[in-house]
Image: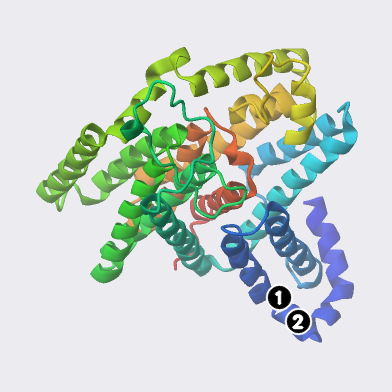
């Protein structure tokens, strides 16, 4: 690879600096700290601060590549889709009629992608850090779940205007919790939980397999509480996402436990399904909220999204090749030319349509190529592998990515930094586990 040849040449001159620098020799620990801190700060600080932490880990990784002897980039073949996506995004930015706003949007994408490179690179060198990364994410989920439960019992004031209460009785209105994620929004918390709950479920199975039953019970309780909080967000897209997460989690558990614990598995699965159905039927606000998904135009939130989809589709048809440029501010300015009066929007409320509108059809194809290839190989790995620990490590990011991709069909909180940081980390974990079979942790 040409780039690695250049890096080897650079290392001839930077190697001595590395040998005499205490900071450079401890750079891996610093990068590791920044990666973990990025998860922690994302649950209560602003988008800009989250971006600074993610960017710091990326910059330090670049410094490591330049100064650490024999260090280089080892991209996987499937990442050619990601490179193509990045190049096509650059083209869309260059062709944008609102160049300044588009560059601002592009910088966010750049930070997310470089953070992915940072995490991938670090985990290739330190695969044992995958577990602490997942534990950190689980800790963040636990914190948000406690806050969400507290908000529910405190009956926090409604901050989302998209719950149609025109045809509801007071007892049918759900208290939508929103956690601490900035900006405060129940849909944002719902999307965050969709991405992170698989980590908690997976860790429950991981410690159960290791016969550490206390830890398994703790993570099982966190999974239960976080699932309850997800429903308390009132985010219907998250409801759809968690449904797929449960189905896929049971499918993986079926592979692991069916032969040895067939009767216990059937009992457990039946109990969980029964409790879910009972809760849906017995809790009126939840039942009304779930059934509103199928109300189509009769629900104002659904109707709003249909109007946005129609306008966004027209935007795509007029800019299908290279898109309008990156970023929600750029989107909002141009959307004003297409929107139906009274239906302003910050995004397309569909991540696939949003990607196509912003960067064109080929960028969407490249992005989907990256995800489909990665997920396909993850599913094949789960299907063919017999090592339970490795299956769990691969299942966590696979289910997490699928969950958020399903949720993304009806919302675009996916583009918020809290979700992007976890999403690209899941991609990095899956990449390291599926495409590197030469280590064991």
Residue on which disc 1 sits: 27
Q: Which residue is mark 2?
A: 23
Q: Is residue 36 left or right of residue 111?
A: left
Residue 270 as seen in the image, left or right of residue 91: left
- Residue 441: image tag: none
Other residues around mark 1 within 10 Å, as few (<14) / some (14–19) / many (≥20): some
Answer yes or no: do the residues labelled 1 and 2 have beta carbons within 8 Å?
yes
Question: How far from the left and from the top, in percent, is residue 182?
Answer: 61, 51
Residue 29: give x, y in percent of width and height. 64, 76
Direction from residue 57 to residue 225 in the image, left or right: left
At 39% across and 50% down in the image, what residue appears? Answer: 152
Q: Quadrant of residue 240?
A: top left
Q: Nearer the viewer, residue 260 or 350?
A: 350
Residue 117 locus on image (x, y percent):
68, 54
Residue found 85% across the figure and 80% down from its top: 17
- Given residues 290 and 408, the one toward you in this image is 290
Task: State the SS at label 1.
Answer: helix
Of residues 251 and 50, which is closer to you in this image?
A: 50
Residue drawn 22% across and 32% down?
281
């Amino acid at each position: 690879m040409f780039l690695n040849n250049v890096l080897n040449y650079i290392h001839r001159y930077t190697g001595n600096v590395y040998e005499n620098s205490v900071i450079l020799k401890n750079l891996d620990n610093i990068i590791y700290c920044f990666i973990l801190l990025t998860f922690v700060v994302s649950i209560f600080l602003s988008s800009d601060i989250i971006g600074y932490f993610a960017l710091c880990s990326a910059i330090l990784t670049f410094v490591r590549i330049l100064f650490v002897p024999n260090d280089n980039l080892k991209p996987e073949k499937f990442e050619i889709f990601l490179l193509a996506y990045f190049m096509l995004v650059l083209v869309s930015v260059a062709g944008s009629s609102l160049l300044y706003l588009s560059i601002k949007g592009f910088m966010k994408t750049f930070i997310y992608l470089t953070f992915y490179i940072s995490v991938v690179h670090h985990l290739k060198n330190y695969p044992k850090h995958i577990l602490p990364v997942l534990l950190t994410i689980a800790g963040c989920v636990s914190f948000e779940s406690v806050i969400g439960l507290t908000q529910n019992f405190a009956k926090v004031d409604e901050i989302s205007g998209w719950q149609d209460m025109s045809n509801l009785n007071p007892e049918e209105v759900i208290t939508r919790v929103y956690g601490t994620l900035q900006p405060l929004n129940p849909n944002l918390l719902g999307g965050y939980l969709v991405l992170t709950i698989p980590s908690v479920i997976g860790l429950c199975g991981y410690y159960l397999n290791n016969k550490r039953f206390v830890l398994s019970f703790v993570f099982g309780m966190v999974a239960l509480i976080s699932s309850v909080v997800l429903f308390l967000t009132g985010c219907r897209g998250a409801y759809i996402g968690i449904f797929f997460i449960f189905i896929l989690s049971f499918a993986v558990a079926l592979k692991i436990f069916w032969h040895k614990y067939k009767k216990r598995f059937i009992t457990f699965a039946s109990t969980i399904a029964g409790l879910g159905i009972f809760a849906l039927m017995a809790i009126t606000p939840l039942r009304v909220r779930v059934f509103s998904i199928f109300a189509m135009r009769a629900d104002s939130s659904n109707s709003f999204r249909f109007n946005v989809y129609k306008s966004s589709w027209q935007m795509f048809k007029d800019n299908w090749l290279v898109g309008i440029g990156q970023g929600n501010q750029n989107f909002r300015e141009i959307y004003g030319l297409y929107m139906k009066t009274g239906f302003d929007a910050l995004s397309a409320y569909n991540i696939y349509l949003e990607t196509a509108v912003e960067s064109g059809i080929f960028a969407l194809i490249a992005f989907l190529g990256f995800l489909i290839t990665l997920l396909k190989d993850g599913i094949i790995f789960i299907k063919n592998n017999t090592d339970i620990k490795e299956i769990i490590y691969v299942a966590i990011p696979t289910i997490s990515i699928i969950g958020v991709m399903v949720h993304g069909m009806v919302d675009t909180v996916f583009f918020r930094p809290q979700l992007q940081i976890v999403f690209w980390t899941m991609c990095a974990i899956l990449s390291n586990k599926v495409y590197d079979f030469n280590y064991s942790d």
